[in-house]
Amino acid sequence: MQFRSPWPCRLFLFDLDGTLIDSRIDIANSVSLALARMSLQDVARSQVVEFVGDGARKLIQRVLREAIGGEATPEQVRRGVELFVEEYQRHSLDTTSLYPGVRETLDSFSWAHFGVVTNKTERLSRQILEGLGVSSRFCAILGGDSTPHLKPHPASLREAMRRCKVEPNETVMVGDSPVDIDAGHAAGVITCGISEGFCGRTALEASGCDLILEHFSELPAHFCPPS
């Protein structure tokens, strides 16, 4: 598909961290608490944010590599994931908020359906969206454990389209990372990158986005209901 603005669509699939929500501080703080419980040195918040996007296991593998200065053992990774999840369940809404304009932008798309496809667990994703008062807006919320595969595999996107009863040619994947864009390409949908998220414009440009916007609130200018 060759993107042309405004593009007609019926379904927006959103990544969560770095797209709908700014969760950087709570993720980094939860990592710090987990490392402290393992008697390991802390890792800079900026580095933790760079490690986000491929699920909790990959996050902790990368964090432990940085903290230890080498590869962690399987037992260290297992324990690190366990402790991180414990801490993050307690602290996932300490400072996390919707990005500016997200709520208003969702309201403006009265004709569209919405889904969330994230590599965070479904339980945590629902907990956060419920805490922020927007979970009811989504016809599908899929986490990294909702299908057998994490993004960039397209399984979660395909399942979201199935639940929302919308075809790929009327679906847009919106995310902040190459993982999201690669998943969108694999699912055969239009891809839109949000550069104010965790990964930035350069990474999105390299991933071959159909459209890159700086802010989430710019979405309505580029999409319209099908005729």
Image (cartoon, rainbow, N blue to C red):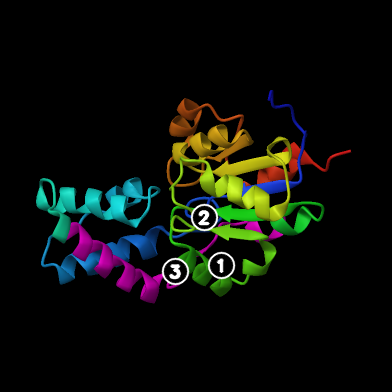
SS of the residue at dot 1?
Answer: helix
Residue 134 sits in which quadrant? bottom right
Q: Position of residue 92 (x, y in %)?
A: 42, 69
Please tell me how crowded label 1 is: few (under 14), some (14-19), or many (20+) other residues with Cα within 10 Å: many
Q: Label 3 vs label 2: CA separation?
A: 15 Å
Residue visible at 60% across and 37% down in the picture = 192
Badge nearest the viewer, 1 or 3: 1
Residue 107 sits in which quadrant? bottom right
Q: Is residue 83 magenta?
A: yes
Q: Amino acid at mark 2?
A: Leu
The answer to whether the residue labelled 2 contacts the one labelled 1, judged by CB atoms less than 8 Å apart, is yes
Residue at the spot of label 3: 95
Q: Which residues are magenta?
A: 76-105
Q: Earlier in the sequence, mark 1 or mark 3?
A: 3
Residue visible at 67% across and 48% down in the picture = 12
> Against 91, is 220 above or below?
above
Residue at the spot of label 2: 16
